Amino acid sequence: MAAPQQKLEADGEKQNDGYTTDTESLVHSSDPLHPANHISDLCRRFYSLGWVTGTGGGVSIRHGNHIFLAPSGVQKEMMQPTDMFVMDFHTREYLRRPRALKPSACTPLFMAAYTHRHAGCCIHTHSQWAVLITLICEAGLQNSAERNVFAIKEIEQIKGISRGGSGSDEIAEGGRKVGNLGYYDTMKIPIIENTAHEEDLKGALERAIEEWPEACAVLVRRHGVYVWGKDVAQAKTQAESLDYSFQLAVEMHKMGMKWV
Amino acid sequence: MAAPQQKLEADGEKQNDGYTTDTESLVHSSDPLHPANHISDLCRRFYSLGWVTGTGGGVSIRHGNHIFLAPSGVQKEMMQPTDMFVMDFHTREYLRRPRALKPSACTPLFMAAYTHRHAGCCIHTHSQWAVLITLICEAGLQNSAERNVFAIKEIEQIKGISRGGSGSDEIAEGGRKVGNLGYYDTMKIPIIENTAHEEDLKGALERAIEEWPEACAVLVRRHGVYVWGKDVAQAKTQAESLDYSFQLAVEMHKMGMKWV
Amino acid sequence: MAAPQQKLEADGEKQNDGYTTDTESLVHSSDPLHPANHISDLCRRFYSLGWVTGTGGGVSIRHGNHIFLAPSGVQKEMMQPTDMFVMDFHTREYLRRPRALKPSACTPLFMAAYTHRHAGCCIHTHSQWAVLITLICEAGLQNSAERNVFAIKEIEQIKGISRGGSGSDEIAEGGRKVGNLGYYDTMKIPIIENTAHEEDLKGALERAIEEWPEACAVLVRRHGVYVWGKDVAQAKTQAESLDYSFQLAVEMHKMGMKWV
Amino acid sequence: MAAPQQKLEADGEKQNDGYTTDTESLVHSSDPLHPANHISDLCRRFYSLGWVTGTGGGVSIRHGNHIFLAPSGVQKEMMQPTDMFVMDFHTREYLRRPRALKPSACTPLFMAAYTHRHAGCCIHTHSQWAVLITLICEAGLQNSAERNVFAIKEIEQIKGISRGGSGSDEIAEGGRKVGNLGYYDTMKIPIIENTAHEEDLKGALERAIEEWPEACAVLVRRHGVYVWGKDVAQAKTQAESLDYSFQLAVEMHKMGMKWV
C-alpha cells in the first residue's frame, strides 16, 4: 500500500546517539494545550488558511527549557503529537527525535526568536500574500527607495501587533491594547533575501531582528514570513493580523493605492 | 506551557467592585440560542468568513435589558459562553464581567445602535471588502464628489437589507420583503473617519446613525463596518448581504464599472 | 431572547385555508436523500460555496408530482426539513406550507424548468461570478454585439454540461459523456434583465428557455443564475461546472483574453 | 425520489465479462490508508480545494500490481470505496468494475505515469490556476517564444518538487530535500494541447513525459494538470506545491512581474 508518511510509533525510546530515555512522555498528554497537541492543532488550522501547503512552513512552541518543533516533510494537516522534535533550549540537543523523521530547517531561525526576543511561539508561513509583498517591494513598485522593508499605516488591524512581537499586549479598560502599535504608527517589517538553503537565512534573520527592534516578524523574499509572540495566542493572532495586512496591501496595490 | 488565553473559569462569582451575585447563571444555558451560546457560535462562523481575524471585530446581542458582549482580545473562533460580559441596558453597569478579561472597545458603539435603532444584535467586522470600499471612496475613484458614502444600486442582493437596519423584514406572499430596499433603490452606507481609539468613534457613529435613517450600517474608514438588526437573523443576514455588495463593488471597480 | 427565525415545529397540521391533513409525513424521513432532507443538505453546501448568502438563492426538487421548495427568508445554512413547502405539480396547490414561513419568490421560475425542461431539480444562486458575467456582457466588454448571452468555448469543464440541462448525461466506455457539450462546442447561456420583483422574471425566463433549447441555465442580469437538471446530481454538478466557467471567464477577462 | 448517483452496492460480484470472483475484498478494509479508502478521502479533500468540481478531475493509486481508479461521473466529495475500479497493472484488465459506473477517461493517462515514471499515485485536477497558466502561455504574455512550457524560478515552494516527480524526496539533516529542485533551479512543466476526447491526450502526454524527464507534471491547455509521485504523500504535496506556484504566477502576471 502506498504509505504517505513513514512513521515509527515508538520511535523515541532508543536514540541513535546511544542514550535511552522515556522521551515519549514529552509528547503524550490529554491536555489539548500541551505543546505537542497544540502544534498539531495549529498545523491543521494553518493548512486550512493556505499558509503551510505542500509541507511548507513550520510551527514551534517553547515550554520552559523545552523547544517543541514540528518536523520537516510531514503534511501539516496530518501532524501528530508523536511527530514532534523536542530540543533543550540551553544545550541545543534533541531530547526527543522521531527516528523516521528529520528536524525542520526552520529550527535555527526559530531559535533566533526564542533567544533574541524571548518568544514563546514561532510560526513560519509560505502565505502567498507575504510572498507577493516581497515581490512588490523588490520591484520598487510602491516605494522605489525602500525595497527591503514593508511599511503600512492607518489600517485598524495593525493595532493587533505588539511592539517587537513579544511585548506586552495588555488590554486596558475599554479594550485599548497598550503595548501594541497605534493606528497612526507605521508598521515596518524588514525583508531579507532568500538563500538556497533555509538554514543559511539565520545570519540575515538575526541581523534583521537586531536592527528592527519594533518588528514582530521578518519577511523572506520569494519565500514567506517568520512571526513570533510571547505565547501561542500572541504569535497566532499576530500572524493573522500580519497576513490580513499583506492581503489588504496587495489589493491596495492592484488599485493603485499607496501603503504609506 | 504556553497559555493562549488566560481565563478563570469561575470568574463571575465575586466582582472586584465588591458585590457578590450568581452571575454565572447569566451565561449558562443548554439552549444553543441563548445569547452567550449564540455569540460564541456567531464568532466561530464569522472567523471562518474572515471577518474577525486576529481578535478583531465584535458581536453583541440584546436580550431584554441584558446586553451580552464578546470580550476584547479573545480569539473569536475559540470564544466560550463564559467569556461574555453582560451589561444592564439602562444603568450601563456590568452585571457580569469575567475577571481575567477586558470589555470590548466596541461597547459604546453597539450601545448607539441599541439606543438609536432599537437593535437586537450588533456585528462589527474587519472585512477587507469593507476596508477596500472605504479606500476607493477616500480616493474618489468612483465618485469624486462623494467620499463619505458608499452607494450602489440595481444589485439583487440589496433587497436583503431592511430600511434603517432594524425595520420590518416582513415577507409577503410570493417572497417579497415589504420593508426592505427594492431593486431600484440606491443603498447608501455612510463612512466615518477612523480614530486612534475605537471608543472615540462614538460621536461620529451616532451622528451618522441620525443623519442616515435608512442606513443599516456605518462604515469606518480603513477599519471595517458596524451593522445591526432587530434580531440576530436580521443582523447576520444583513452583514452577509452588505459584505456581498462590498466584494461585488470592489470587483466591479477593478473592471472599470460604476456602482451607480 | 433574540429569536433568529420563528418557526412553529408542528405548523403543517392545520392550514389557514381550512383543510386538515397529515402533511408532516411529507417531510419526515430518515433517508438522507428524501427531498426534504436533501434540500437542507444542499442549502448548507451551497452556503459554504458563497452561492446563497444572506438568505439569497433557492433550491427545489421534484419528486413525482410533489415539488419540494425551500422557503423564503430562512438562512440557508440552517435550513431544516420541516421548513419545506410542498406543491402539487398539476394543481399548483400547496400540499404543505409551514405556517410561519412564506413561499419562495423563485417558485414560478422553478416551475418553468419543471414544465418546459422536465427537470427534477432546480437551483438558483446569487454567485458573484454569475453577476459579474452579466455585468461584463452588459457593458459589451467582451463582445459589443452580444449583450444578452454568455458564450465560451474550448474549456474542458463545459463537457460537464448536458444539452438543454436535463438531457442525457450517459457516460460511454472510456468516460465520454455522450449527451453533453463537447470541447469544441460553444456553451451559450442567455441573460435576461432583472425585474423589481422576482416573480416578474417568469415571462422572460420562459421565453429564454424556449429560445435556447440547448441552454442548461438562464442568467439574470445583476442578480444570479437559474440552473436545472434531470435530477439533483445533474443540477448540482452543472451548477458547479457553470460557476467554474463564470469564475474562469471573469479571470480571463481581467487578463484581456477573449472567451470565444 | 431524485437519485443523485445510481450505485449498486454489491455490484462487483458478477462481472458481465462472465467471470465470478470475490472482488469486494479488493475495496473493503478498515485501514484508512487502504487505496479504496484513501482515494475517497483524497477526493473529498481535493473537492474542498476546488480541484475536482462538477465530477471533474481524477485520482488513482497503484498498490503492487493493482491500480485503483476513481470512476467517471461520480461527485468527488461523495466518493465511496465501493465506487473504485481496480485494474491489473500488467494485463490492463479490470479486476473489479462497479456495474453501474464507467471507468475514468483518465485511465490511460494515469497508466502512462505508472509505466514511464514508476509512479505510485496520480492526480488530475481542473484547478483554475492551472488553466489560467496555460492561457497566459498560449497568448505568449510572459514569454512569446515559449508557449508550451510553464517556467518559474526563485520561489521557495518549488523546493517541494522532486526531479521527475517520483524521484527521491529524501530529507537530509537540517531539512534539505536532496532529490528535489533547488531554489535557483527553474521549474519547467510542459503544456500539451487539449483534445476533444480525454483518452486522445495519451500520445502527447507520453511524449511530454519522455521529453521532460525532470518534470513532475504535465499541463493540458484549457483543461488542467496531471501530476504524480512515488506515493500518495509525494503526489499530493507536489500537487499542492504546483498549484501554489500556478496561483502565485497568475498573481505575479497580473502585477506585471516576470516568472523567470
Image: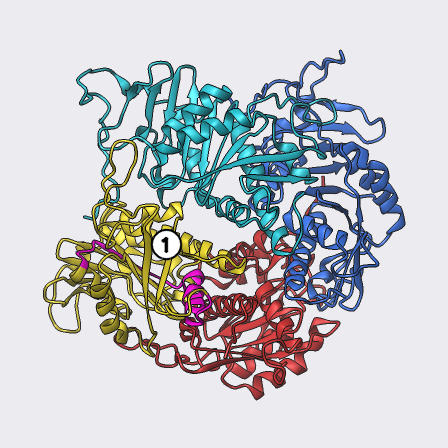
Chain colours: A red, B yellow, C cyan, D blue
Q: What's drawn in magenta, residue-wise?
A: B117-141
Quarter residue C212 falls in:
top right
Is residue C217 in the magenta section?
no
Query: At 27% from the left edge and 45% from the top edge, which residue is drawn?
Result: B32
Residue C16 in percent (x, y) is at 18, 23
Residue with the mark numbered 1: B242
Closest to the observer, B143 or A35: B143
Q: Quadrant of the C terminus of chain C?
A: top right
Residue A239 in percent (x, y) is at 50, 68
Quarter residue D159 falls in:
bottom right
Is residue C168 rendered to the left or right of residue A63?
right
Closest to the observer, B232 or B117: B117
Which residue in the rendered view is the most extreme toward the top? D18
Is residue A185 rendered to the left or right of residue A5?
left
Which residue in the rendered view is the most extreme toward the front? C145
Which residue in the rendered view is the most extreme toward the bottom? A211
Which chain does the residue under circle 1 lie in?
B
Q: Is residue D103 visible?
A: yes
Number of callouts in the render? 1
Closest to the observer, C191 or B75: C191
Q: Is residue B11 visible?
A: no
Which secondary structure lies at badge 1? helix
Relative height, residue C152 to residue B19 (above, below): above
Is residue B135 in the magenta section?
yes
Is residue C91 rendered to the left or right of residue B170?
right
Residue D121 in percent (x, y) is at 73, 42
Quarter residue D91 falls in:
top right
Label 1 packing within 10 angstroms: few (<14), some (14-19), many (20+): many
Query: At 22% from the left edge and 55% from the top edge, which residue is drawn?
Result: B27
Residue type pointed to by label 1: Leu
Relative height, residue D112 to residue C90 (above, below): below
